[in-house]
Amino acid sequence: MTVLRAAIVLIPLALALACRPEATQPPEPEATAVLFGRVLGSDHAAAVPADWQARVTAEYEDGTSLTPRDRDSNGDLFAFKVVPGKRVRLYFEAVPYQAAVSEAFDVTSERSYAFRVPDVVLDRIRWTMALFEKGNGEAFGRNLEAQATLAEKTGSADIFRANLEFYRKASARFPDCLKKIEAFERTPRAATLSKQAVARGVPLDLVRAIAASPADAARRQPEALRTLAADQRVARSIRNEATRALATVPRRPSN
């Protein structure tokens, strides 16, 4: 467990009353703490793409909520203002990457504190990732359930459901893993997550086509891809995949 060694204490606001009722001292500023850091993909060793964005969600371990609870990273950078004296856990999600959760960070007792979280690297979903080592269907199935649980906790059914299509493509070489996806899709849990993703603007058939073959999707459904790429309801990392698919087929010059 990572422990913040500095201490943070919430200083209560105090108004010092002078002799006359209307005379007051300005209030003491509230104590603040900031967690910040970087989130990037395992394929970003050379450089982080200019359009990169991940969804980062923060929660207090005691069950109370931050405000805002989640935010999109600014490129590879993120930051949260948190209440001193709390334990904070962070969740990281993007397409097409395996979602991750941090250990809980202790934030205790100093008036003002900024703590850099160690870099978070999300594993890109592809058949060469360690998850598919030896085609272990049982391990893959447990991971799929854990990813679904994380999406339910953060409210990111859209990212999870899009990633499911990339897991499907990566599982093509591993029949036992593919069977786990097919079994999961028959569950009420999967149906609920799919409905939530559609409600957030994710066209499931189109996302499946992008994951299976971006170039083929661009040739067959260019207008649908342009619509998806421009839909502000949809997570940026999903829209990025639509944009990249379109880039695989050069646009014909207009006459």
Image (spheres, rainbow, N blue to C red):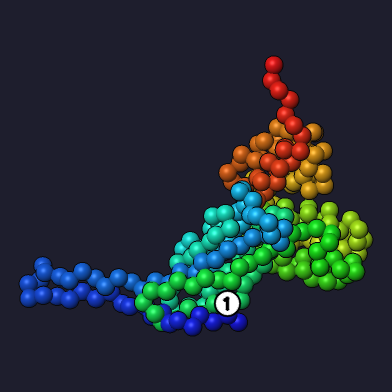
- The residue closer to the viewer here, 88 or 6, is 6
Q: Is residue 207 left or right of residue 23?
A: right
- The residue closer to the viewer here, 153 or 143, is 143
The answer to which image quadrant residue 12 occupies is: bottom left
Instruction: Tell me the kind of residue under disc 1.
Output: Ala
Label 1: which secondary element: loop
Q: Height in image: 243 above or below 114?
A: above
Q: x, y percentage for residue 7?
A: 43, 82
Reading the image, the residue beneath label 1 is 104
Residue at 59 percent of width and 71 percent of height: 118
Q: x, y percentage for residue 81?
A: 45, 67
- The residue closer to the viewer here, 227 or 196, is 227
> In what quadrant of the picture does the C terminus appear?
top right
Q: x, y percentage for residue 238?
A: 67, 49
Q: Height in image: 122 above or below 219?
A: below
Q: Height in image: 205 above or below 194?
A: above
Q: Would residue 129 be seen by someone viewing this image from the given angle?
A: yes
Q: Is residue 170 left or right of residue 244?
A: right
The local crowd at label 1, few if under 14, some if 14 to 19, many if 20 or more residues have their Cα within 10 Å, is: some
User: Farthest top residue?
Assistant: 255
User: Farthest left residue?
Assistant: 20
Q: Height in image: 232 above or below 92?
A: above
Residue at 89 percent of width and 56 percent of height: 172
